[in-house]
Image (tube, rainbow, N blue to C red):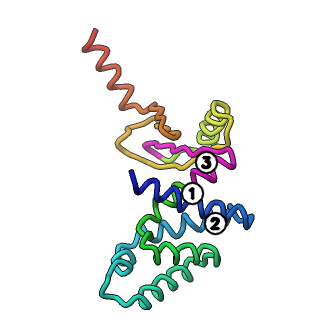
Amino acid sequence: MANGSIARRWAKALFLLAEQENRLLVVSREIDRVAEAWVSSQDLQSAMANPMLDRKIRSTILGEVLKALAVSKTMENFVRLLNDKHRIGELAGIARAFQLLADQKENRIRAEVISAVPLDDTVVASIQAAIEAATRKKVLITRREDSSLIGGVVTRVGDLMYDGSIRTQLNRIKEGMLGG
């Protein structure tokens, strides 16, 4: 996975710079915003990859996007360097790798809680507390709704998935009845 190692190297360089400048939180937020803008705009990706556009025009386009995102000079320089080195397409991977480094430094993990309907804040807080107790790390939770679950909750923590959905429970009952 060459692209993964490239993303990790760039992320580590940005991470070390952010640490050195004591701006880890700011840079963490900015890299997410820049990566989201990149991933969500096919027009931006096409313009930056278009060899028919003059390099100055592409630089101006990139500058306008970064200005609209109100990023720091550090982030602007980093993204411009990525563009100059033809690595801007790695932005999403760099952002993920950067967040992993920041999470390790801050002793935190990310979890995704998926439910059929929006969950009450107290339910999410209890899930968060249970994960924090089990991992002894600060947990950052992202919520998502998926109506195909019927009911219940699926929680992903890193590579682990805890499936408490009604669909899975019904499948287990069905398998038990057919198997035994």
Please state if 119 lies on the left or on the right of 61 as rendered. right
Residue farthest toward the top in the current orientation of the protein: 180
Residue farthest toward the right in the current orientation of the protein: 22
Give the magenta range.
99-117
Q: Name which residue type carries label 2.
A: Val
Q: How many C-alpha atoms fall within 10 Å of the one at disc 3: few (<14), some, or many (≥20)?
A: some
Please state if 7 lies on the left or on the right of 136 as rendered. left
Q: Secondary structure at mark 3?
A: strand
Question: Residue 119, percent across and down?
Answer: 53, 44
> What's the residue at 66%, 36% (across, down)?
132
Res 75 → quadrant: bottom right
Q: Which residue is mark 1?
A: 98
Q: How many C-alpha atoms fall within 10 Å of the one at disc 1: few (<14), some, or many (≥20)?
A: many
Q: Which mark is residue 140?
A: 3
Q: Are marks 2 and 1 in contact (CB under 8 Å)?
A: yes
Q: Name which residue type carries label 3.
A: Leu
Question: Residue 70, percent across and down?
Answer: 60, 78
> Mark 3 and mark 1: span between their CA atoms?
15 Å
Question: Residue 78, percent across and down?
Answer: 56, 73
> What's the residue at 66%, 60% (across, down)?
16
Pick the quarter of the image with the C terminus.
top left
Question: Residue 161, percent across and down?
Answer: 46, 35
User: Viewer-nearest of labels 3 and 1?
Assistant: 1
Q: Secondary structure at mark 2?
A: helix
> Mark 3 and mark 2: span between their CA atoms?
17 Å
Q: Which residue is mark 2?
A: 27
Q: Is 31 a magenta residue?
A: no
